[in-house]
Amino acid sequence: MTAENVIIERDGHLAIVTVNRPSKLNALDDQTIAELDATFVSIDADDGVGAVIVTGAGEKAFVAGADISVLAKQGVLDGKENSRRGQALTLRIENCKKPVLAAVNGFALGGGLELALACDVRFASSNAKLGLPEVSLGIIPGYGGTQRLPRLVGSGVALQMILQGDPIDAQEALRVGLVNGVFEPDELMAKCKEVANRMVMRGPTALSLAKQAVRRGAQMSMPDALTLEADLFGIISSTDEMKEGMAAFLEKRKPSWLRK
């Protein structure tokens, strides 16, 4: 796939996806959203990819937000269309069968934070700033931020961030549970790869079904969510992957997961 604003690199079984518009602080315009969406379609279908790391080009920003020059011209219909387009991308990332990690290397504001929220795990550089400043521009978050942020950090913290509009630093993001860890900028990618590679060592189908259990279960009542978990547990119990994992444990060896 040819893309102008997204770079895809492989490191073993890891796919490194970089939003590459550093002159615009990697802001999300329509083209970049379309390229990211196509990238995740390709990654999801690639059995050689075990996990994904999303980051931004340059040293200043992960993704600084949506492209304001585009948003400034929108009306009711194209505003809704723009929101749905961004939501479709974040759902694509959230529903990816592989673990997706965000390496937040600088500003993650507006659509950038919403992109990170769609990832499974987030790590930040010590100089990162994270926030949803949309109300400062007279709009609201539109790429899933009003829904994912309170589910992650609680409605009180989320409402303060959304209604106040000010970004928080990496340590505060760690304190409230918005990110899973904070590292110095020159260590961030290596640490993300370390965590991602540990995930890749696990059963690929188990990873996918575990994601389903958490993601889908969060939208259900507890009884329905437990039924979902039991159903998925039954599915994984019928796989060769489960047989290999159990045999490897009993034989005191590492499992041999088949990846192309």
Image (cartoon, rainbow, N blue to C red):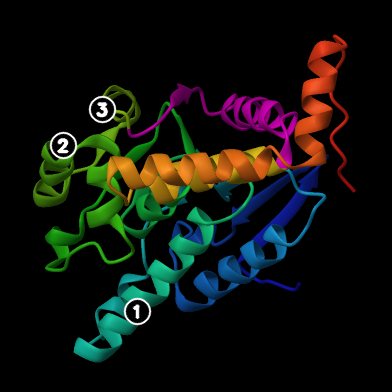
Upstream in sequence: badge 1 or badge 2: 1
**Horizontal side, residue 8 vs residue 173: left or right:** right
Q: Is residue 111 above or below residue 87?
A: above
- Residue 137, x across and y down, in percent: 16, 65
Q: Residues within 10 Å of mark 2 (few under 14, many from 20)?
A: few
**Quarter holding residue 200:** top right
The structure residue drawn at horizontal position 88% and vertical position 11%, both measured from the top left corner, is 251
Q: Is residue 251 above or below residue 50?
A: above
The structure residue drawn at horizontal position 82% and vertical position 49%, both measured from the top left corner, is 48
Q: Residues within 10 Å of mark 3 (few under 14, many from 20)?
A: some
For mark 1, what is the residue?
82
**Horizontal side, residue 33 vs residue 15: left or right:** left
- Residue 51, x across and y down, in percent: 67, 43
Identify which amino acid the numbered label 1 is placed on.
Answer: Asn
Residue 128 drawn in magenta = no
For mark 3, what is the residue?
176
Identify which amino acid the numbered label 3 is placed on.
Answer: Val
For mark 2, what is the residue?
157
Q: Are marks 3 and 2 in contact (CB under 8 Å)?
A: yes
CA distance separating discs 3 and 2: 8 Å
**Horizontal side, residue 20 vs residue 83: left or right:** right
Provide the residue span drawn in magenta: 178-204
Upstream in sequence: badge 3 or badge 2: 2
Residue 100 seen in the current view? no
